Amino acid sequence: MNPAFDSVAAIYDSAFTQSIIGNAQREIVWGYLKNVLNEKEKLKILELNCGTGEDAIWFAKKGHTVLATDISEKMLEVTEQKVK
């Protein structure tokens, strides 16, 4: 299988995640989540289409257990490198 995102996985963070739009989207989503998540309640989260793992890592840093999945093996490889 050769999903479309395999070909851009290596540059995805610089091209989108760290872009003005990517940062703005995360700021909005994470800001909302900070207001609705109970800091004392740790969740088990299944993230579908995790991409390069930015959100999964954010949840994990908050103490949640995360199972991050993606159809793109290359995106998962980038996620694994970030986690290490």
Image (spheres, rainbow, N blue to C red):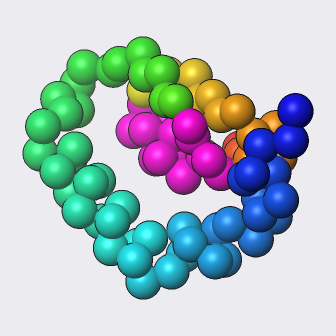
- Residue 78 in picture, x, y percent from top left: 78, 51
Can residue 57 be found in the magenta stretch?
Answer: yes
Q: Residue at x 65, y 51 (%)?
A: 52
Is residue 58 shown left or right of residue 7? left
Rendered view: 44 above or below 72: above
Quadrant of the image occupied by residue 67: top right
Rendered view: 14 above or below 65: below
Which sits in the foreground, 75 or 30? 75
Whether residue 84 is visible: no
Can residue 2 be found in the magenta stretch?
Answer: no
- Residue 74 in picture, x, y percent from top left: 83, 46
Quadrant location, the C terminus: top right
Is residue 3 shown left or right of residue 48? right
- Residue 25 in picture, x, y percent from top left: 33, 65
Q: What residue span does the magenta drawing correspond to?
A: 49-63
Which sits in the foreground, 56 or 47? 47
Quadrant location, the N terminus: top right
